[in-house]
Amino acid sequence: MSLTIAAQDAAPQQTWLEKLGPGHIVLAVALVLYPLVASDFFLTQIGGYSLIFGMLALSLMMLAGYGGMVSLAQITVAGIAAYAIAILGNNNSNVLGFGWPWWLAAPFAVLAAAVASALIGWISVRTEGIYTIMITLAIATATYYFAQQNYAIFNGHSGYAGIHAPSFWGVNWRDPKAFYYLCLGFAVLSYAAILYGARSTFGLTLQAIRDNPRRMRALGYDVTAHKVFAWFLAGIIAGLAGVLLVWFNGRVSPGTIGVDAAIDVLIIAVIGGLRHPIGPFFGALVVVLMQTFAIDIVGAERFNTLIGLVFLVIVFVSPDGILGLWGRIKPHLAQESLRSGP
Amino acid sequence: MSILDRPSSSDLSGGGMTRRQAWGLFWLLAAALVAWLVFAVWPEWLNAILISKKAFVSAILNGVTLAGLYFLVASGFTLIFGLMRNVNLAHGSLYLLGAYIGYEVANRTGYWLLGVAAGFIVLAAVGVVMQVFVFRRLEGDDLRQTLVSIGISIVAADVMLAVWAGGTYQIAVPEWLDGALTLPVITAVRSNGASVFLTYPLYRLVVLAAAIVIGVGLWLMLNKTRVGMMIRAGVDDRAMLSASGVNVHAVFAIVFAVGAGLAGFAGVVGGSALSVAPGEDIRYLLASLVVVIVGGMGSISGAAIGALLIGLAEQIGLIYFPTYGIVLTFVIMVVALAIRPQGIMGKAR
């Protein structure tokens, strides 16, 4: 969590408004005022969901964009946090459920997720490049099957239900407005942390390792340790998203961490773009909107075909996602007046 | 490709036994132990530990035959990845599509062999189409190839769900392959002195035999034929092979056809032994991933070893620790990565 604290400290300076940039300010105002115009459905099913999946994809974007490690196990990490909440806190499935208060269970769940993420990272950084995606996919799939088979820890196929979001300060945080602001708060924290972290010493070192691991090793950096620590940090973000997800759904089952969900996170990150931390949130918004409204067009059954095709088109046309499309069109628009010939 | 190629340190160790001899002795003892476990009548204490001899030997046989199936699927995956650096995460979908096509053809014509052939041929064609129209366009871009293959697998799974719905199919095995075989393995001795022999489905043994034949064939093709030579040369230096007048894209299309065709073949064969249902694509993708990670990329012998390990682990886990079985698979993968990140038979790069 040191990163998020540092980000808060760094922000308030004399020119912080300028530093923030007009884009961020407009976005922030829009997001804060969104509950004034949105119905409960739009607040939670679109707003909250997009923010949660945006955070999940953000943790992937951090690993892929800055570390060059494309992970398919982010939903697994989030799932570990979600299961930890169900096991440590209360559930009505009559399995485990230690009844810890939320302020103890939530940090432990996030920590468990971060440690699990670091372990997954430690396993996968033993190889490089495209192997990472295969190893993480294998881990995600194996965890899914394990959660489905095992009744002692994961309560098998049915998983856990009856998990409640906490109520404190006189607010029930599962209420649409409160939950939206809760998600927004954590999403902004993670986003700011990534923005700041990317320019920190650690972030720059990580990017240097991504670009040339051999040189960094020769310069005396511990490449493995940096990568594993990046996994740990990504695990914190994914873990937070997992906690929010289980508070929102009130239940967690193997389906939550299935292969479809793991691939969804990758789709979101790729559709949004892996170059800038805002990309995953755009991607999440697009996918969640599609998920909600495309059902009216193509029917609930064929939704995966639609999302798969959109994904294929994005990968073929613009490897950097929607942000990449914008980045390619923007200079054309800006220089349209300067063009003379065809 | 084989153990013999590895730089052995046999000349370093002095004393009575070289390292290779020591390993030879070790494997000999292991083989003797396995032979004893399989053929001898077990004493009481062993039955007490391992439930029963029948359960144990059946688990081993199931594991080995499942390994044959895994090998068929994973050998295509490992060929495509190892030789072309082309990660095809739609490989599980190829398996499932092959199974469905085999089911349709076998069901309509009534000839099981025709279904098997159709599974291979149609999927080989699909593989060529994928290579020519999709992967060739993204040559040299690992990540995009992988992403595209994920996209294809999503669409394929959904389309197959639309066509064949969510039901479970079983491809009927022809009569001459059906039935059980009595093996010369005594599982128990009755009180009247008569021995109880183990019976095992004939079909599964045929699957195993087919996998072995295909594995040997693949190895021979890669190492002894002209096409195999071209494939290996193309992997090492594509530009040089191209400069010497070989159409490299044709070579890669052949490899893709063989890899995808094998997945389709395995689909029909596996769909006859087990069942065909949505979700099997993920199962076999996981199996291929783990087999190839453990065995080493691009190595046929590695795929065989990996498949054997995973198949045995899965079936033994199923019997002895049912709800933790998958953990065994997982542990094998982690241990393999920790000790040999490039896989048991993989080359260090």
Image (cartoon, helix red, strand yellow):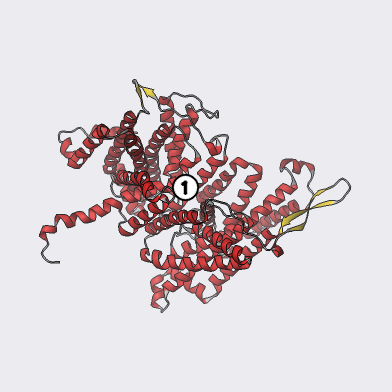
Q: x, y (%) of residue B71?
A: 58, 59
Crowding at label 1, few (<14), some or many (≥20) Cα neighbours within 10 Å? many
Toward the viewer: A4 or A211? A4
* Residue plotted at (56% across, 74% down): B224
* Residue plotted at (20% across, 42% down): A23
Residue A223 visible in the current orientation: no
Q: x, y (%) of residue A26?
A: 20, 39
Q: x, y (%) of residue B268?
A: 58, 61
Residue B274 visible in the current orientation: yes
Judge whether B268 appears above or below A252 on screen.
below
Could you say which quadrant of the image residue B20 lies in?
bottom right
User: For mark 1, what is the residue?
Assistant: A259
* Residue plotted at (48% across, 63% down): B80
Judge whether B4 appears above or below A134 on screen.
below
Q: x, y (%) of residue B54?
A: 74, 48
Q: Quadrant of the C terminus of chain A?
A: bottom left
Secondary structure of residue under mark 1: helix
Task: Please give left or right for residue B243 compared with residue B322 in the image.
Answer: left
Task: Please give left or right for residue A332 compared with residue A298 in the image.
Answer: left
In the orientation shown, which residue stands out farthest toward the right? B192
Task: Please give left or right for residue A25 compared with residue A143 in the image.
Answer: left
Q: Callout 1, which amino acid?
A: Val
Q: Quadrant of the N terminus of chain A?
A: top left
* Residue plotted at (53% across, 30% down): A93
In the orientation shown, which residue stands out farthest toward the bottom? B245
